[in-house]
Image (cartoon, grey):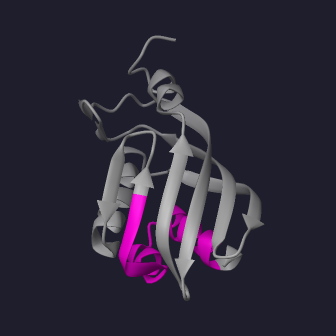
Amino acid sequence: MISLARENVEAFNAADWQRAKATLAPDAVYDEVGTHQRVEGADRIVEAFQGWKRAMPDAKGTITKAVVGDSTVTLELTWTGTHTGPLQGPTGTIPASGKRQETRAAMVFTFQGDRIKEGHQYFDLMTILRQIGALPQ
């Protein structure tokens, strides 16, 4: 399960959307707690990932820790990227700032067989918004 969770992040890093989709159950759910975005279905989850890549084409997740449970894997990771494209936020579109961001996060994956059934991502959106200049420091 850890290798499949890592594969999901590595596929995002490479912008390999077919590879990312292959890690997901067709009816998977992605819950991005920081943005209050909840997406259902593998295709829609990939679209959500693509939105982050449009905003930060060099976005990359670096996994620092992985913990496995019965049917879950929790990853601690750091997301980095340069905000060079429009970012769709909870209150609208944030124009590109050209600024870099670095944000620590945790992802909790629940598995159904050999696919991710649910993914919950926890990160501090305020930190991202401050770093890209969308909020005052």
The residue under the point 67% across, 60% down is: 74
Q: Is residue 74 above or below residue 22?
A: above
Question: Which of 59 and 9 lies nearest the eye of the viewer?
Answer: 9
> For the view shown, which residue lies furthest in the front direction?
70
Residue 22 drawn in magenta: yes
Q: Is residue 61 above or below residue 114?
A: above
Q: Quadrant of residue 84?
A: top left
Q: In which quadrant of the rendered image does the N terminus lie?
A: bottom right
The residue under the point 48% across, 26% down is: 126
Which residues are the magenta region?
4-30
Image coords of residue 88 (percent x, y):
28, 40
Q: Is residue 105 above or below residue 53?
A: above
Image coords of residue 45 (percent x, y):
35, 65
Image coords of residue 19 (percent x, y):
46, 80
Q: How many marks?
A: 0
The residue under the point 57% across, 66% down is: 109
